[in-house]
Image: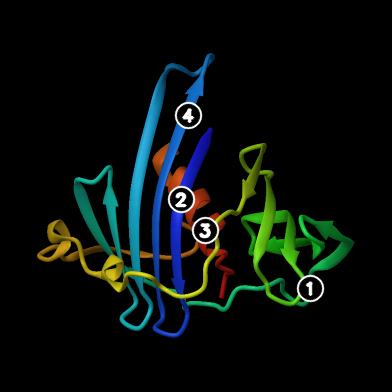
Amino acid sequence: MNGSAVVAYDFTNSRAFINATVVQKSLVLKPELQRYSVLYIEDYKNNVEYEVDDGKNCQKAWMDFNMTKQCVQGEAKLLQSGLVGDGTIIDTYNTTLGDSYQNIRATIERGSCLPVHLVYIDSDYGSVTGVDVYGITPGIKDTKIFDIPPQCKKVSPIYRKNQDDKNDLKSRIRKIVKKFMSGRRNP
């Protein structure tokens, strides 16, 4: 499985934007290439999330969690420190993300909480997933990314979303992408 995402995290205005594409191929399970893309717009002030699957269908959900400021939490264990690039100091921690991910290695830039590399070990699915983080810039360049997509304007909320939603492969991919990109912690 390979994926990429564009993420905007606006803590000041309590909103997030995630536009992700995941590609998967398994010689054993499904030999044909599977592609899934999803757009999330999360409005934490109103506890609403819009999800557009493959640029077509929109779902609106009530969210049962708050936006959290992202950084390594107090229970994390510092494993090592080092330098990358032009002398940027990094720290690697072992931490958790609620009950879903009991073993995460997070490498962040010291003093800024900017992620550099993450490794998630998911014992439920027996998987190890690495995430490299590139192109972080301060500020939101175009706030129109938070506009409600046209296909979502007349959609009513169909379900209540919480941290434990996990059903089919599509839901699992959504969960993985969202946890990687937004780093949510269970309340």
Residue 65, given in percent of the width and then of the height, sits at: 46, 75
How far apart marks 2 and 3 lie (CA) works out to: 8 Å
C-alpha span from label 2 to label 4: 15 Å
- Closest to the camera, between mark 2 and mark 3, is 2
Secondary element type, mark 2: strand
Q: Residue furthest left?
A: 154
Q: What residue is pinned by disc 2?
A: 5
In the depicted view, which residue is nearer to us: 106 or 179?
Answer: 106
Number of residues whose C-alpha sits closer than 10 Å to that of mark 2, classed few (under 14), some (14–19) or many (20 or more): some
Cα distance between the residues tagged 1 and 3: 21 Å
Circles 2, 3 touching at the beta carbon (< 8 Å)? yes
Mark 2 touching mark 4, by CB under 8 A?
Answer: no
Classify 64 as above or below 37. below
Could you tell me if the residues under marks 1 and 3 are in contact, i.e. CB atoms within 8 Å?
no
Task: Indicate whether 166 appears above or below 153.
Answer: above
Circle nearer the N terminus (4, 1): 4
Element marked by disc 4: strand
Labelled pair 2, 1 in contact (Cβ < 8 Å) = no
Does residue 116 appear left or right of residue 2 in this picture? right
Mark closest to the chain's N terminus, 2 or 4: 2
Q: Residue under circle 4?
A: 24
Q: Residue at x 52, y 49 (%)?
A: 176
Residue 181 is tagged as 3
Q: Which residue is mark 1?
A: 75
173 shown above or below 116: above
